Image (tube, rainbow, N blue to C red):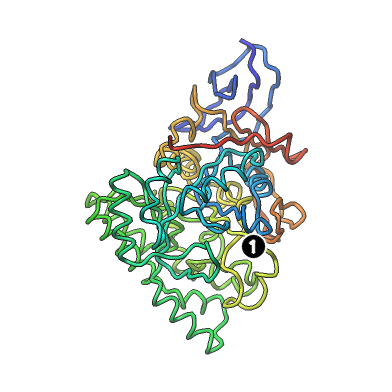
Amino acid sequence: MVFDIVIKGGNVVLRDGVYKVDIGIKDEKISCIAEQITDEAKEVIDATGQYVMPGMIDTHVHISEPGRAEWEGFETGSKSLAAGGTTSYVEMPLNALPATINKAALDLKLEAAVNQNYVDYAFYGGLVPENLENLKELADAGVLAFKCFLSDITSDIPEDFVNVDDYTLYKGMQKLAELDQILCIHAENASVTSGLSKEFAREGKNSGVEYAESRPIFTEVEAVSRAILFAKETGCKLHLVHISTSEAIQTILKARAEGVDVTVESCPHYFAFTAEQVDEIGPRAKCQPPIRKAEDQAKLWDELLKGNIDWLTSDHSPCTEDLKQGNLWEAWGGISGAQNNVDLMFDLAVKQRGLAVHKFVDLIATNPAERFNIPHKGEIAVSKDADIILVDPNQSYTVKREDLYYKNKHSAYEGRKIDCRVTKTIVRGNVVFDLENGIVGEPVGKLISAN
């Protein structure tokens, strides 16, 4: 056999550990894993000294095209993901306009995405008060899951996304249970966080710690508990997004032990920053839920290292630079993070805290692939898509503005030194990023559909 690519000499991360094996790629698939491959190959990649692992599947990405493409488009967003070691992503039903709450809006997004993505992609459908009758058409059109907000995101812009009320949550969960769909939930108590934010802003409480205190831990726990209660009543499958506290995770674990079908994600920024550091970074570090205090972050780390968090996502939520001006109440809430998921968390979790490398791969690839039923991705195994990244644990670099592929080149990680580096990203056997050459070739990303 003549392979398209053979990767040799690397530390290959398989389901149960790390092995010194070669990988043969043919026709976009992993076709051979052996101690030594001697067959001819069109290209041989020397991975000596590096980890060879499945690319990240980032299930929480905001691309703002169409409608707000000046914030982020498919081309720039997918380049950023590729450079950061992500080979597939699932795009949220906001912040594009119109929001993805019916098939017509989904069709606009599908059309906009064609021939622009450097990595594979899929879409969520949204759950909002006015679209209960549109859930089936979205499911039939192949969205991977659905998303709703319990936090306050009211908007006066036509066709923008808004949060659900409890009636919509209940009826939506009933419908999605019938359709055998997963509902992903942003869980914060809308009334309390909105009221405290207005109160703190009036009183001039503008620090990072005060911003965290305006969205206290119990507001996340309450919303998680409410979602779980509704799930018990309806039988709907749940996924809780960007959870920021140990208390909420413990609530989720208790529900899972009681039979609720629920999973949980968190994000690198909750592990990389503390509320006490936000003042130095400024509004680039504003997000919801907020960056937590150091004592709360320490408890979140315990949850991750104990295996109580199912996977990691970027929650890449970009915007134009003008929207990141002003104080923490005035600035847009969202962190541009798609380009620094794998290397940052490998450094923090594996190198600094001793997490096993194959457990790290569960967090970035295997678990989301299994939960969202993407059977051809998520691990290095024969017949799987050749979605592979090379990670050098001995390289260090500083995040610089000029190296970012985002349309708006701002990030909370600017100036941060990371002791690890993604050196190559391969999507279905196509090299799309190389450290020496940057983004390689034309967009090769394909749609991943639930159908």
Q: Is residue 420 visible?
A: no
Which part of the image, by quadrant, shows the N terminus? top right
x, y (%) of residue 376? 47, 30
Name the amino acid, label 1. Cys
x, y (%) of residue 378? 48, 35
Disc 1 crowd rating (10 Å Cα; few below 14, some 14-19, many 20+) is many
Which part of the image, by quadrant, shows the C terminus? top left
x, y (%) of residue 202? 53, 88
From what the image shows, is residue 225 above or below residue 331? above
Q: Nearer the viewer, residue 414 or 158?
A: 158
Q: Disc 1 designates what residue?
A: 319
Q: Nearer the viewer, residue 352 or 217?
A: 217
Which quarter of the picture shows residue 287?
A: bottom right
Residue at image location 49% in from the left, 62% down from the top = 161
From what the image shows, is residue 256 above or below residue 323? above
x, y (%) of residue 311? 45, 48
Which quarter of the picture shows residue 151?
A: bottom left
Dot 1 falls on a residue whose secondary structure is loop
Q: Is residue 443 visible?
A: yes
Q: Residue furthest bottom?
A: 203
Count of numbered tags: 1
Is 56 placed left or right of 440 in the picture? left
Residue at image location 60% in from the left, 15% down from the top = 37
Residue at image location 52% in from the left, 63% down from the top = 160
Q: Nearer the viewer, residue 247 or 103?
A: 103
